[in-house]
Amino acid sequence: MEESLVPSLKNTFSYDFFIGAAINGGAINGSDTLALDLIRREFNSITPENIMKWEHIHPFPDKFNFEMPDKYVRLGQKNNMHIVGHTLVWHSQLAEWVAQVNDSASMAGLLTEHITKIVGRYKGKIDSWDVVNEALNEDGSLRESIFKEVLGDHYLELAFRTAAKADPEAQLVYNDYNLTHPEKREGAIRLVKNLQENGVKIDAIGMQGHWNLERPTLEEIETSILAYHKAGVKVLITELDITVLPNPWELEGAEVSQNFEGNKFMNPYPESLPDSVQNQLAERYADIFSLFAKHRDKIDRVTFWGINDGASWLNGWPIKGRTNYPLLFDRNYRPKKAYESIMKLKK
């Protein structure tokens, strides 16, 4: 059968948006052949889960690690995929030495060099860059970070200007979690408008989809898609996974510095997911994808944060050692009921 006719996520939504997955080192270096087969069959976009974060790609002032990023890009090129770069500027997973830069001229030079060298190396190869990641507080104000501390709010403009100069054709994205929350959404829109008013290129908002079985509501998601589109940018769903586990102390979002241990009630499904919850997850994914398809003219890409349940970061966050089931494929790389519910939408 011709590849374009084989039932898959990428073929089912080929006229709507790219379907992507965040991939780890095992898929990139070819050691996880099951993951590699699944990626090639189901997805037409890839995002690197960790290998391009600052601590990995630029661990020392005069050292860049391009071996794994080069392999990642070659994998995407070989399979004719939409290739995402993640992420250029983020307060987390930074190399330790960055925090020692304490004057504005040095920090501006550092940011410029970091972005120019990485984006320039993959000019014309990486299609979309998460330029700045998670720069907002929940109230929509700018988060305190080493970049804001040393450069002030100006660091955002510098980052986007530098990326645009290094590759004028690449899609430039601001990426964050909880962007369906009204105050944070307004903060993101202010960020977009400030860049636009200063003549700075920003093409899209990346709405991280670290959601659960009930929240955000479909109405909150739709309101946000419409608001970002109205602000003049495309919408990307960048890190989609649906946790089925209880959320300790109403913890929300994807703030990776938080961690909670030692409550057995927080790991209710250590062996398998009950059918009732499996059905709930399938219905939730179907509802969300129906909404995405409705707004296909505003959405460029939907990317899952991981290939299958076993590879999901949610097994270790916010409580280590839990067993979560947030994606479309199980620990044996087999499609779940949630996968079938999405595929049925187009039949």
Image (tube, rainbow, N blue to C red):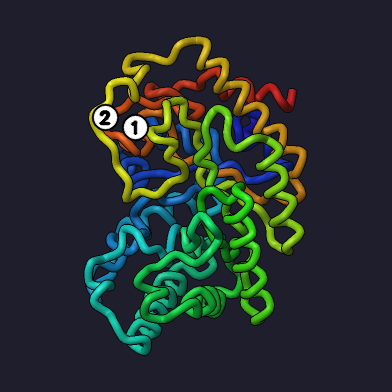
Residue 233, percent across and down?
A: 69, 61
Q: Which residue is mark 2?
A: 321
Whether residues under marks 2 and 1 lie with C-beta atoms below 8 angstroms apart, the answer is yes
Check disc 2: other Cα within 10 Å, few if <14, some if 14-19, many if 20+.
some
Query: In terms of depth relative to the viewer, which is nearer, 174 or 154?
Result: 154
The label number, if any, that marks residue 305 in the structure image: none
Q: Residue at x 50, y 80 (%)?
A: 154
Inter-mark Cα distance, 2 to 1: 6 Å
Amino acid type assigned to the residue bearing label 2 in the image: Gly
Quadrant the C terminus occupies: top right
The kind of secondary structure element at disc 2 is: loop
Amino acid type assigned to the residue bearing label 1 in the image: Asn
Residue 16, percent across and down?
A: 72, 42
The kind of secondary structure element at disc 1 is: helix
Q: Is residue 277 above or below residue 133?
A: above
Query: In terms of depth relative to the viewer, which is nearer, 244 or 165?
Result: 244
Quadrant the N terminus occupies: top right
Q: Which residue appears farthest toward the bottom when viewing the image?
A: 105
Residue 172, percent across and down?
A: 57, 65
Q: Residue at x 40, y 67 (%)?
A: 144
Query: In terms of depth relative to the viewer, which is nearer, 251 or 338?
Result: 251
Check disc 1: other Cα within 10 Å, few if <14, some if 14-19, many if 20+.
many
Q: Which residue is mark 1?
A: 315
Q: Please indicate whether residue 298 sits to the left or right of residue 319 in the image.
A: right
Q: Is residue 120 above or below residue 57?
A: below
Q: Residue at x 28, y 69 (%)?
A: 64
Q: Which picture quadrant has residue 52?
A: bottom left
Q: Please indicate whether residue 322 sits to the left or right of residue 295 in the image.
A: left
Q: Is residue 252 above or below residue 103?
A: above
